[in-house]
Amino acid sequence: MIFAAAGYNVTLFDVDPGQLSKAESSLKTTLQQYEEGGYLRGNTTAAEQVKLVSYSSSLEECLQGAIYVQECVPENIDLKKKVFCQLDSLATDQMIMASSSSCLPASSFTESLKHRENMLVAHPINPPYFVPLVELIPAPWTKPEVLTTVRSIMEKVGQSPVTLRRESLGFALNRIQYAAINECWNMYQTGLLSAEDIDKVCYDGLGMRYAFIGPLETMHLNADGEFHEASSAIEIARTT
Ligand SMILES: NC(=O)C1=CN([C@@H]2O[C@H](COP(=O)(O)OP(=O)(O)OC[C@H]3O[C@@H](n4cnc5c(N)ncnc54)[C@H](O)[C@@H]3O)[C@@H](O)[C@H]2O)C=CC1
Ligand SMILES: O=C(O)[C@@H](O)C(=O)[C@H](O)[C@@H](O)CO
């Protein structure tokens, strides 16, 4: 939907043909609803965007003329290896292949492949139609120009890419997310706040603030010395 909204032709492939027909009907309904609700992205109508998307039960046919592939198979290392091996055997030297992987780095499933320089992770954040961040994580062998091209494709389609300089377990978003979840869980288990109030601290507090001012910018605006004071106070609170 995001790529079609920007005017790209998109072809979906899935091993399960049932998923393709579900995707086709859900795409039509969803784009129609977004148009009626005023959420549709791009400068074209829902009907025009629907026409840009086609469906194929053959990977070879799906990849004909493709410049960019976004792989979205389940988070399973053997499956990622299998699918990237298939992509590799059908790829042209120009085709860029990105994985949506949330945790698995591209180096763990592309190492032995001929076109590995054109492969990387482009991790979207759910729901990507409304949350624009995409984390781009190169494998050690990903060509810098591939990373630059994916970054500009993402900007062109209206997403907001960030580039990690190297692979890191959890990438960036999940490193932050799991640190927050860990602290929320800790407060829940020690009975400090109810589950509802912990969620409220995020959606009516930090989440809302972080939508327009990030943690480092917040710290920059804090009074001198406040960070050190606060972090030692939190360390004491955690251990008591
Ligand atoms: N669901 C989420 O919130 C997010 C998921 N991701 C990542 O995206 C990837 C996909 O996740 P979901 O969309 O949630 O998975 P899903 O399970 O909803 O969909 C996976 C699809 O892949 C198809 N599939 C299975 N084997 C295949 C093969 N060999 N060739 C082609 N298609 C095949 C399945 O039929 C299914 O339609 C995972 O790596 C996940 O970590 C990334 C960001 C957010
Ligand atoms: O939106 C998210 O949180 C994701 O992008 C993810 O990375 C995954 O859903 C992950 O948190 C759990 O598998």
Image (tube, grey):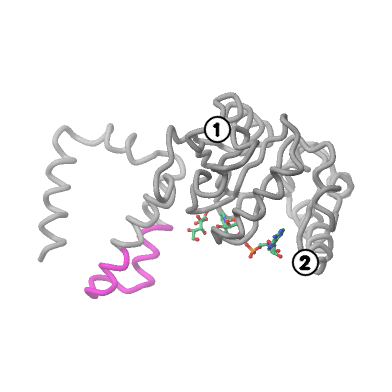
Residue behind label 2 places its C-beta within 8 angstroms of ligand 1 = yes
Q: Secondary structure at mark 1?
A: loop
Q: Would you say residue 197 sits in the magenta stretch?
A: yes
| In the rendered image, the vertical position of residue 136 relative to residue 149, given as above or below | below
Depth check: 42 or 182 in front? 182
Mark 2, Cα crowd under 10 Å, few <14 / some 14-19 / many 20+, is few
The stretch of residues the image draws in magenta is 184-203
Residue that mark 1 sits on: 142
Query: In the picture, residue 204 is in which quadrant?
Result: bottom left
Give amino acid for label 1.
Answer: Thr
Q: State the residue at coordinates (50%, 44%).
A: 107
Residue 219, image x and y in percent? 27, 37
Reading the chain from its start, which is encountered first: label 1 or label 2?
2
Depth check: 154 or 91 in front? 91
Dot 1 and dot 2 residues touching (CB under 8 Å): no
Describe residue 216's horizontal placement relative to residue 79 as left or right: left
Query: In the picture, residue 76 is in which quadrant?
Result: bottom right
Give amino acid for label 2.
Answer: Asp
| In the rendered image, the vertical position of residue 137 relative to residue 185, given as above or below | above
Kindly report the secondary structure that dominates the magenta region of the rendered protein. helix
Residue 138, image x and y in percent? 51, 36
Residue 237, image x and y in percent? 13, 60
Depth check: 118 or 201 in front? 118
Residue that mark 2 sits on: 16
